[in-house]
Image: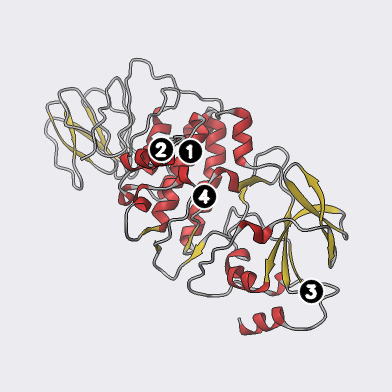
Amino acid sequence: MSFILHALLSPAPFSDTISVYTRMRAPTLTTVSLFFTSEMNSPSAPHLAGHYVVNCKKEGDQHYSLDLRTLQLCHCKEYPATTFLALAPLILSDIEGVHKVLDVTHLNGKFYVFSPRTFGDLHNFLKERRQLKEGLAASIFRQIVLLVRDAHRKNVVLRDLKLKNFVFEDQENTTLRLHTLDDAHLHNGSDILTDRRSCPEYICPEMLLPGSYSGQARDLWSLGVILYTLLVGHYPFFDTNPRMLLTKICSGYYAVPESVSRLGRNVISSLLAHDPARRVTAEILLHHPWFEKARDEPLYTASLADQSVATAPLFPAPLADQTVATAPLFPAPLADQTVATAPLFLVPLTNQTVATVLLFPAPLTDQTVATALFFPAPLTNQTVVTATPP
């Protein structure tokens, strides 16, 4: 690592541009947490940086650079040397789903990071379509979940997950990538954070409380906000008054339209759990049957006939006969056709047929009850009760 830093800071002639990216391996640093202003990467006037003409073209709000070797347009971000060296473990990481780095050039005390051209961001993509069918939403959302899973495996908390930070790598808008890891946090085994910087619509409830919180749980909440927005067309919590917006987030209540399928609702409620400990991890979420169902029916829009389903963001209420409530983790003992929620363990059942699955339950019909470790079962001709928070 010291050799790499020496090479990057060496006074050797950089007029011909030294590409350092191919010589750098992912260093093993501990915590990297850096904050900077938006002016840091503001576009500068067109100028040469080695084999590139930086900021030579503008399309809309996008500035492009030109690779003189290939005559291909690309993106470029400028960093002061100290900032780049602090962010290098993240910028040059191999996390799946992050916009790749083509080249890194040093010139006049700055580092220029070049990446392939993109074709719009997810925020504008959704804005043009207002909301997405579940097949398309599942295809896009699965790529985001894969990114979060790989980042969490590598001790990286992404922190600033939002629609605008995801870009398409192709003109067909099928391949999605996180545009930058500048706001991410590399930790050394503990994902506990204390910062409160976030886009208001994506802030999680625990960030509004004093003390620290789990960075991974924060990412999972952001996943729930993203999926809800893709399927519904607006944020689950929104208000023109910032104080009211934060109050709504603290309450944990949100409404999901009936146009969203039962499995889609289940994914949303598993991520927007008010208790961060109850949010399903990205690793487990990838096995949710909603992805398979939505893939088989790419234009699938659920029709909830003969059903009345409401989401309970916190905890379900006491139940009466023939009423089923969804629990975020474990189902409870059953007796006389009544299902209640239990926090941890199942009790043997009498005069019932129990089918056990590892992750996701089967539909409930007649005297058949399915138990699951993580997600509640889809409901058939049943009613879900929404409870007030404790």
Q: Earlier in the sequence, mark 3 or mark 2?
A: 3
To which residue does mark 2 refer? Answer: 268
For label 3, count other residues whose C-alpha is less than 10 Å away and answer few (under 14), some (14-19) or many (20+).
some
Q: Do the residues labelled 1 and 2 touch (CB within 8 Å)?
A: yes
> Is 164 on the left-hand or right-hand side of 291?
right
> Is 229 on the left-hand or right-hand side of 356?
right
Q: Toward the viewer: 174 or 53? A: 53
Q: Distance between the residues labelled 4 and 2?
A: 16 Å
Tell me which corner region of the image, top left, top right, bottom left or bottom right, holds residue 20: bottom right
Q: Helix, strand, or loop for circle 1?
A: helix
To which residue does mark 3 refer? Answer: 18
What x and y, as percent, mark residue 308?
32, 20
Q: How far apart are marks 4 and 3 (CA)?
A: 33 Å
Colouring chosen for the image of the structure: secondary structure
Q: Toward the viewer: 383 or 32? A: 32
- At a point 69% along the width and 46% down the height, the residue shown is 169
What x and y, as percent, mark residue 138?
52, 36
What x and y, as percent, mark residue 125?
63, 35
Q: Quadrant of the N terminus?
A: bottom right
Q: How far apart are marks 1 and 2 (CA)?
A: 7 Å
For label 2, count other residues whose C-alpha is less than 10 Å away and answer few (under 14), some (14-19) or many (20+).
many
What x and y, as percent, mark residue 142?
52, 43
Residue 68 at least partly seen: yes
Q: Give the amino acid at mark 1.
A: Leu
Q: Give the amino acid at mark 4.
A: Leu
Mark drawn on residue 227: 1
